[in-house]
Image (cartoon, helix red, strand yellow):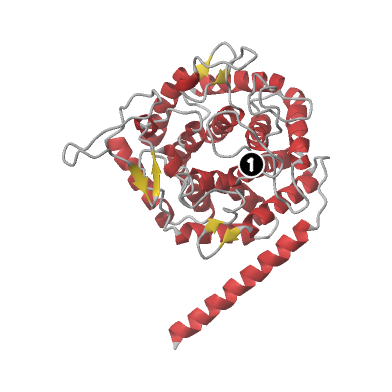
């Protein structure tokens, strides 16, 4: 009898949450967004975009819908795992939205995120060493700061303990390999959950630009939360291996991975992918939030961040966006909001942290925000998002992805802090 009573209460509570979400989603969809940035307009934009995105979330499958029209990805795509990098990049921004909303007395977004994390038992996608598969640890860290329960971080600590005990020493050269089993003579395939993809050994380390957003911020934040310096030491060592490899000291930007060193655009410039370098910019901004002020390498982190952001500011286009190819905007002359959102967040965060000069860089961030607002459809859907890839590509107004929504929310959360 008692268990039935608890079940009945749980059903009622779930129904109330669903009704509340529907009401909020409808209310925010009626808001007309303004490109004029202030606290109110920024929050309204964040809420509208977040509510549209969460309206696409299936509470039964815990996946975003929209596979048929290409809004997200096929369920068998290697990046579609609900604890994988695509979802993780969204949750990073959504957690910022939840914090802002909580400060205004609304716990709805935190409750949604906690339910998602609980449903996944605070676990990760299956490739232990791959930063794409433990990037969701950031969600768990953000939730832990709100709900400090040991169970939230237990799986993350186990995974990172394994990595610390047996760190990968594979080369950072980005390449696909084929390898046969000495027993069955069949090719090894990296496969899980009906997802198959090429074997890339270097992804057991941070061998691609995106990884600097997915990996080290989790390690460094965990170190800050637990006081365990081992996590910070590991992240610091591995990060500089990657930086020293992918940093272009001439243009002060990052190559996506080693395959791009010798590639050139039609105008003769290097192939610098907007979202790739955006991942690095946003990743460094997040790292600097948690890196101790007294850390021996703090100056180097800030130096490379400032050089990169100064160079990116010069590459911003007249409409406030960055094109898919940063140094050759004409080769893929499309608006692109995922790379722009990540860079805009980095500019705003750098200003808030006192690393970037406000007078110089706030106009860059505000111009980018106005451009992002212009890409939000009346429904709240964020368009002009380059689909999952690894190089500059075509984009259309209808293209969207959850990681771009995450970047949008990250940007808004930092701009919100800048206004009275």
* Residue drawn at (47%, 42%) of the image: 135
Residue at the image point whose x is 76% and y is 36% from the top: 371
**For the residue carrying disc 1, how many other residues have a C-alpha within 10 Å: few (<14), some (14-19), or many (20+)?**
many
Quadrant of res 325: top right
Q: Which residue is mark 1?
A: 410
Residue furthest left in the image: 183
Above or below residue 72? Residue 280 is above
Rendering quarter of residue 392: top right
Could you tell me which residue is drawn at 63 percent across and 16 percent down?
A: 266
Which quadrant: the C terminus?
Answer: top right
Give the number of marks.
1
Q: Is residue 103 visible?
A: no
Q: Is residue 205 left or right of residue 333?
A: left
For label 1, the SS is helix
224 and 408: which is toward the camera: 408
Q: Position of residue 233 (x, y in %)?
A: 39, 30
Q: Residue furthest bottom?
A: 1
Q: Relative to 295, is 84 above or below?
A: below
- In percent of width and height, residue 344 lies at 68, 33
Q: Position of residue 212 (x, y in %)?
A: 49, 31
């Amino acid at each position: 009898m008692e268990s039935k009573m608890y079940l009945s209460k749980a059903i009622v509570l779930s129904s109330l949450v669903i009704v509340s979400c529907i009401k909020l989603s409808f209310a925010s969809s009626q808001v007309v967004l303004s490109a004029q940035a202030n606290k109110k307009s920024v929050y309204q934009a964040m809420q509208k975009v977040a509510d549209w995105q969460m309206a696409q979330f299936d509470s039964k499958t815990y996946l975003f819908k929209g596979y048929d029209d290409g809004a997200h990805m096929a369920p068998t795509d290697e990046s579609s795992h609900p604890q994988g990098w695509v979802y993780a990049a969204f949750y990073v921004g959504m957690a910022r939205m939840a914090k802002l909303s909580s400060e205004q007395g609304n716990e709805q977004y935190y409750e949604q995120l906690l339910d998602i994390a609980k449903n996944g038992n605070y676990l990760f996608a299956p490739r232990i060493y791959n930063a794409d598969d433990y990037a969701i640890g950031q969600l768990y860290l953000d939730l832990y700061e709100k709900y400090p329960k040991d169970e939230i971080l237990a799986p993350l600590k186990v995974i990172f303990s394994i990595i610390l005990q047996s760190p990968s020493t594979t080369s950072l050269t980005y390449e696909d390999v084929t390898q046969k089993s000495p027993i069955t003579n069949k090719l090894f395939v990296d496969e899980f959950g009906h997802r198959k993809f090429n074997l890339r050994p270097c992804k057991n380390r941070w061998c691609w630009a995106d990884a600097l957003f997915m990996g080290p911020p989790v390690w460094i934040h965990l170190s800050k939360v637990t006081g365990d310096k081992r996590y910070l030491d590991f992240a610091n060592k591995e990060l500089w291996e990657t930086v020293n490899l992918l940093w272009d000291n001439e243009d002060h930007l990052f190559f996506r991975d080693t395959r791009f060193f010798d590639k050139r655009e039609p105008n003769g410039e290097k192939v610098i992918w907007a979202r790739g370098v955006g991942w690095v910019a946003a990743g460094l901004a997040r790292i600097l939030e948690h890196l101790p002020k007294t850390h021996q390498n703090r100056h180097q982190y800030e130096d490379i961040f400032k050089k990169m952001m100064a160079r990116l500011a010069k590459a911003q286009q007249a409409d406030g966006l960055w094109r898919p190819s940063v140094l050759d905007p004409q080769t893929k002359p499309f608006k692109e909001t995922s790379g722009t959102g990540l860079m805009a967040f980095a500019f705003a965060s750098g200003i808030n942290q006192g690393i970037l000069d406000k007078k110089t860089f706030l106009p860059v961030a505000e111009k980018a925000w106005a451009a992002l607002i212009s890409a939000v459809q009346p429904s709240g859907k964020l368009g002009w998002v380059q689909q999952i890839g690894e190089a500059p590509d075509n984009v259309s107004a209808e293209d969207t992805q959850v990681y771009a929504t995450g970047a949008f929310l990250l940007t808004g959360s930092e701009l919100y802090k800048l206004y009275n």
